[in-house]
Image (cartoon, helix red, strand yellow):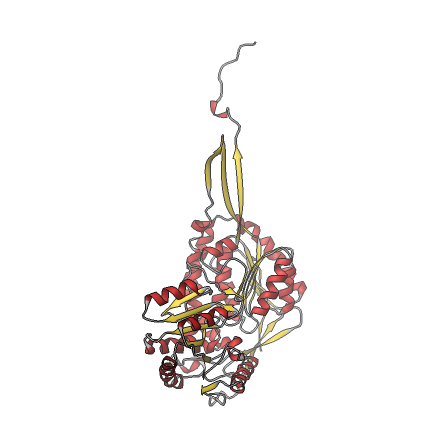
């Protein structure tokens, strides 16, 4: 059985706690590896080692740090196929989806090549008589990143890249469900020239997480996952004086106006609702057609598209549309919510509760589902399902649809499909959600903008990647200087007469 340890001081090290977690192949349900679960003592040792390595790295000039990012881009492109294969084998994503995961992380590393520009301070000449003032952006020191299973490459890179570019050392706690790609990325960073110890990977569970949160050495914490855990981590981290950014759950609505191109809207919903088996925080899980006629036309377009989706393991080829969900527990939770939707009165238009894939009966596959006539008091509407389930909630008017999105406790992303510019502009201006798509179903910003939701989708005041990441991973020091006058007169070469 393959063992996955930790990445400490530039090399893979076996765990010593005696505790492990199973890493499954989601397509077959088989255990393919054992992942070490770090103890508090192991985690504290790793943090201390990161602190020792950070001193020299923080003193390295930003241009040299940027060159490590440049090399990392080349190495990731070199190993893209190998990384995607491992990612798919542990997460279950299709190979094209796995490469998309890697590519969106890679784009943030590309952005980090501009670290020298992003880290420039400010200068004021003659702020007072002979007084100059300037500010510097300096690294926090050692930061912790606690990352989710659904994007095992993209999410760590979104946080580790900017943190390292700013001169910090990073202790990454990836998901124990698919830990291999983060370990591989750590090895690539060392190959790219990152000094050993500046990027440590500690695999573990709540014990490791709490140790990171309580550590006096850790100065900042980033987290991505469910809202209850985001609230817990934010509260515990900030209680010990740490800077924290914690990103939680989502329930993303897509409003479909009567004037929308219905084929375009249906195609968008298929990709946004069922891609990666719905295991995306930016997945569209709620379609909100305005008017019954619009809803009927949309459902008519969706059903044949959903029934044509190809579900299978990543090894079945690049024409597979979606793979399994990550664990058996995830599958059971999704099916439980689907059953609750039926019990609470929603119409299950596409029902794949009995879906079985021949030859992969023990895999964690969930077929695509479509609900209609969902109401806002149902569990399938209120909760983040994180599976291939699309709920249709009919709205009578545009104002009703807008209110629905605004009233939900989550505010990660939303979209509107319409041909009317005034409606789109009004929606983008008024909706209280962090990321908005106009005829774009998954409005994930590119690396040079910032990614972050509102309401219970985000805790903290600075977003992921883009300019906000350089603000989060640095603190500002302001210097006021004045030099004594007279030195500029220069030296004297004659003896002064005695007075």
Specify the quadrant of the image occupied by residue 429. bottom left
Residue 79 visible: no
Q: Is residue 237 above or below residue 420?
A: above
Residue 76 visible: yes
Q: Is residue 286 above or below residue 69?
A: below
Q: Is residue 145 left or right of residue 192?
A: right
Specify the quadrant of the image occupied by residue 459. bottom right
Closer to us: 182 or 461: 461
Closer to us: 405 or 92: 405
Residue 70 % position (x, y)? 42, 57
Q: Quadrant of the N terminus?
A: bottom right
What residue is at 62 percent from the left and 55 percent from the top?
A: 241
Specify the quadrant of the image occupied by residue 7. bottom right
Q: Is residue 408 above or below residue 361?
A: above
Residue 90 % position (x, y)? 51, 76
What residue is at 47 percent from the left and 45 percent from the top?
A: 121
Q: Quadrant of the C terminus?
A: top right
What residue is at 45 percent from the left and 60 percent from the top?
A: 450
Residue 23 % position (x, y)? 56, 76
Count all numbered tags in the image, as a single digit. 0
Residue 350 % position (x, y)? 44, 87
Q: Is residue 48 above or below residue 319?
A: above
């Amino acid at each position: 059985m393959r063992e996955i340890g930790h990445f400490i001081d530039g090399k893979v090290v076996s765990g010593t706690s005696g505790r492990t977690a199973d890493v499954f192949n989601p397509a077959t349900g088989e255990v393919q590896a054992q992942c070490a679960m770090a103890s508090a003592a192991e985690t504290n040792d790793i943090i201390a080692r990161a602190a020792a390595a950070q001193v020299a790295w923080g003193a390295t000039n930003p241009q040299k740090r940027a060159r490590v990012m440049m090399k990392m881009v080349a190495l990731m492109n070199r190993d893209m196929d190998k990384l995607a294969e491992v990612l798919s084998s542990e997460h279950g994503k299709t190979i094209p989806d796995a490469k998309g995961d890697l590519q969106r992380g890679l784009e943030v590393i590309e952005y980090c090549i501009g670290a020298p520009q992003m880290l420039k301070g400010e200068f004021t000449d003659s702020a007072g008589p002979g007084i100059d003032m300037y500010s510097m952006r300096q690294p926090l020191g050692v930061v912790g990143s606690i990352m989710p299973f659904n994007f095992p490459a993209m999410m760590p890179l979104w946080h580790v890249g900017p943190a390292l570019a700013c001169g910090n050392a990073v202790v990454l706690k990836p998901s124990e469900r698919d830990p291999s790609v983060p370990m591989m990325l750590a090895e690539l960073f060392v190959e790219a020239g990152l000094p050993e110890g500046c990027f440590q990977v500690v695999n573990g569970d709540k014990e490791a997480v709490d140790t990171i949160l309580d550590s006096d050495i850790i100065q900042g914490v980033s987290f991505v996952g469910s809202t209850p855990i985001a609230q817990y981590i934010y509260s515990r981290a900030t209680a010990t004086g740490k800077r924290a950014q914690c990103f939680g759950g989502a329930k993303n609505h897509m409003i479909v106006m009567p004037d929308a191109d219905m084929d375009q809207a249906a195609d968008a919903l298929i990709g946004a609702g069922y891609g990666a088996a719905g295991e995306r925080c930016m997945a569209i899980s709620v379609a909100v057609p305005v008017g019954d006629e619009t809803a009927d036309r949309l459902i008519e377009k969706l059903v044949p598209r959903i029934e044509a989706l190809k579900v299978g393991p990543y090894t079945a080829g690049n024409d597979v549309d979606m793979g399994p969900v990550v664990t058996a527990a995830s599958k059971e939770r999704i099916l439980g919510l689907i059953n609750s939707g039926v019990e609470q009165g929603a119409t299950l238009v596409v029902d794949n509760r009995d879906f079985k894939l021949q030859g992969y009966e023990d895999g964690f596959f969930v077929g695509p589902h479509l609900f209609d006539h969902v109401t806002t008091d149902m569990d399938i509407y209120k909760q983040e399902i994180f599976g291939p389930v699309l709920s249709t909630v009919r709205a009578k008017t545009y104002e009703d649809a807008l209110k629905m999105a605004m009233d939900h406790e989550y505010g990660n992303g939303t979209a509107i499909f319409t041909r009317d510019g005034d409606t789109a502009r009004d929606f983008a201006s008024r909706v209280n959600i962090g990321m908005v798509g106009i005829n774009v179903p998954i409005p994930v910003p590119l690396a040079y903008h910032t990614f972050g939701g509102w309401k219970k989708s985000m805790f903290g005041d600075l977003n992921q990647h883009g300019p906000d990441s350089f603000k989060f991973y640095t603190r500002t020091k302001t210097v006021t200087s004045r030099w004594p006058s007279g030195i500029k007169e220069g030296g004297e070469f004659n003896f002064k007469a005695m007075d």
